[in-house]
Image (cartoon, rainbow, N blue to C red):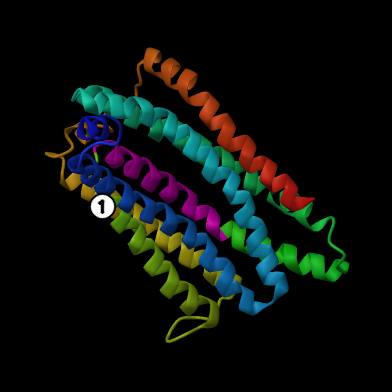
Amino acid sequence: MWKQLKNKYLGDRAFWRMMLAIAIPLIIQQGITNLVSLLDNVMVGALGEASLSGVSIINQLFLVFNLTLFGVLSGASIFGAQFYGVLDWRGMRDTFRFRIVFGSAVTLLSIGVFLLWGDGLAMLFLSNENNSPAAVAETLDYAMSYLHISLWGLIPFMLSQTYAGLLRETGQTLHPMIASVIAIVTNLVLTYCLIYGAFFFPEMGVAGAALATVIARILEAVYIMVYTHLHAAQYPFIVGAYRSLRIPGRLCRNIFVKGAPLMLNESLWSVGMTVISSS
C-alpha cells in the first residue's frame, strides 16, 4: 500500500530522474544568466563608486525589460508545451513566431524608451542622492556610456531567450545551459580584459564592461540558434519558421488571455522594485 501511495503522490525513480535531468540544467542556466549582469557590477566596482552606481542603475532598468520579456515569452510557452505534447509542429511553429514578433516588439519599444528617456530614468535614482552636482553628473555619464553600448545586446538576448524557451518545451535543457556557460565565460574574460586593458585589449572602463556583455549575449544567441537549425530533424517545427510571420488570430487571443496576467505580474513586480530602489 505504501508503495502505491508513494508512486501516486511522489512518483517513481524514473520520474525523478527525468525531472532532475530537465530541472538541473535549467536552474544552472537561469543562475548563469543572472550572473552575466552581476559580473559587471562586481568588476566595475574597482573603478570607483560613480562607475559602480552608473552600471547598477542601468542594470536595474534592464531588470524591467528582462522580466517583461520573460512574461511575454512565457505566455507562449504555455501553448508551446501543449503543442509539443501532441506533436503539433504547426502549432509550435506558430508559438515560435509569436515569440519572435512580440519579443521583437517589446525589445524595440524598450530600446526606444531607453534612447529617448534613458537619462531621465537614470536621474530618478540620482535625484535623492546627497552627492554634489559634479558627482551626480559623473555617475550619469557612466550610466549613459554603459547604456548606449548595452542596448546592442538586447536583441541577441531576446533571441537566445526565445530559442532556449522553445527547446525547453521539448525537454532539451542541456544546450540552453551550454549557451549560458559560453556567455558567462566570455563575459568574465572580456569584462576583465576590456575594463582594465589586460593583455592586448584597450582599457575601456565602464564601456568595456558593456561591450563584453554585448559580445557574450551575441555568442549565446548564435550558439543556441545554430544548434537548433542544424538539428532541424530533431526539431521539425523550426523548418520554415521564418517563411512567414503570420500568426493565427485565435492563437494570439488565447496567448494574450492566458499570458497577460503573467506578463503584468512580472512587469509590475520589476517596476515596483525599481521604484523602491530609486526612492
At numbered mark 1, what does the secondary structure look like: helix, strand or loop? Answer: helix
Magenta-tinted stretch: 149-170
In the displayed structure image, the side of residue 80 where residue 211 appears, left or right: right
Q: Looking at the picture, which amino acid does disc 1 mark?
A: Leu
What residue lies at 16% left-to-right and 33% top-to-bottom?
Answer: 236
**Residue 261 versus residue 231: which sits nearer the camera?**
261
Dominant secondary structure, magenta? helix
Residue found at the very far front of the displayed protein: 1
Image quadrant in which the N terminus is located: top left
What residue lies at 42% left-to-right and 85% top-to-bottom?
Answer: 200
What residue lies at 38% left-to-right and 69% top-to-bottom?
Answer: 185
Residue on which disc 1 sits: 174
Q: Is residue 131 above or below residue 176?
A: below
Mark 1 burial class by Cα count in 10 Å: few <14, some 14-19, many 20+: some
Residue found at the very far top of the displayed protein: 250
Q: Position of residue 234 (x, y in %)?
A: 14, 39
Q: Position of residue 107 (x, y in %)?
A: 51, 41
Q: Position of residue 221 (x, y in %)?
A: 35, 52
What residue lies at 56% left-to-right and 74% top-to-bottom?
Answer: 43
Q: Is residue 273 above or below residue 3?
A: below
Is residue 159 located in the magenta-colored stretch of the structure?
A: yes
